[in-house]
Image (cartoon, coloured by chain):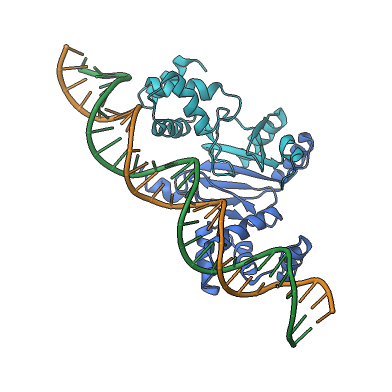
Chain colours: A cyan, B blue, C green, D orange
Amino acid sequence: MEINQIIAKFHEKGFKATPQRLAICKYVLLSKDHPTTDMIYNEVKQEYPTISLATVYQTLHLLSDIGLLQELDSNNGISRYDPKTSPHINIICKKCGKVEDYESERLEKFWSKIVDDLGFKPLGQRIDVYRYCEDCRRSRVK
Amino acid sequence: MEINQIIAKFHEKGFKATPQRLAICKYVLLSKDHPTTDMIYNEVKQEYPTISLATVYQTLHLLSDIGLLQELDSNNGISRYDPKTSPHINIICKKCGKVEDYESERLEKFWSKIVDDLGFKPLGQRIDVYRYCEDCRRSRVK
DNA sequence: TATTTAAATAATACTGATTACAAATTAGCT
DNA sequence: AGCTAATTTGTAATCAGTATTATTTAAATA
């Protein structure tokens, strides 16, 4: 997504396109690894050393509200954010919380039928599947 | 699920079938409304006035581990628990966090194909769909 | 049924992610 | 360039969930 599109999106929804917001967008929306709030804060602090953690939280909620990302808040109480808002599966490790994406045409096709059945257009969706990831299976602590 | 089956399940997995655990099972596994930890605590306290909140948390995690229920930890940071562990959709209100179930044969059929594609047997899954519920749409605060 | 013991409970202190607040700053309008 | 409501900051407060430890107990064994 282009930076100009993002700015337009903010304006369209009646919000200001502040540099802090754009910096967070630039990082999260390009990110491949479902970052946590902390990862985002530390990354954006490189560019805006005075940014407040509160701003990061507020912005992430805003981005979720206007549909630019999906909040994943995983099982260990630490939220993660996913720039992909189209139907896909999050393969989540029950131990460490790491998230991998799984996309397939079949899933998208199925999903559109399911939504038809539902009878309303959802604001968003989230499809998770749990397992233990490679790393956690190797170090079989529990 | 019969109480005897539940007791057997605990023993099979090497855990003790304590009265506290059984009381929590009795409430949650029969519950239709995806209760929060607090709801469970307050309900079970009727029968076991000395029960500790810590016991409730521990028991719920145990029940999740041995596959008797599904932890839902919803978007507002408060965990909810779902006695239904088969594939179904949780229709979640983005404002108040209320959860409704949606089941369909079509979904179950689709899901088994998706799992085949995945190439591994998941420990569990969670399929959420977001909207604003009736009540929250009516009281259009935000 | 009494004994034994590892497991479980209760009570409470603690942790850490998230939110609330209020003063200072600023995007974007005119 | 000035205005103003929106936004940001920094910090304090909140609160769900966890850790800890002394006490109790389920259930295996004799």
- For the N terminus of chain B, the image quarter is bottom right
Decide if residue C30 is on the left or right side of residue B13: left
Which residue: 46% across, 23% down? A44
Decide if residue B33 is on the left or right side of residue B119: left
Q: Is residue A18 above or below residue A93?
A: above
**Relative to the observer, which residue lies in front, A132 or B70?**
A132
The picture places residue A47, in percent across and down from the top left corner, at 44, 18
- For the C terminus of chain B, the image quarter is top left
**Relative to the observer, which residue lies in front, C14 or B34?**
C14
Which residue: 52% across, 67% down? B43
How many callouts does the rendering have? 0
Q: Is residue B34 above or below residue C28?
A: below
Q: Is residue C5 above or below residue A84?
A: below
Decide if residue B98 is on the left or right side of residue A86: left
Q: Is residue A17 above or below residue A65?
A: above
The picture places residue D15, in percent across and down from the top left corner, at 43, 52
Which residue: 46% across, 15% down? A3
The picture places residue B134, in percent across and down from the top left corner, at 45, 49
The picture places residue A132, in percent across and down from the top left corner, at 72, 41
**Relative to the observer, which residue lies in front, A121 or B33?**
B33
Which residue: 35% across, 24% down? A16
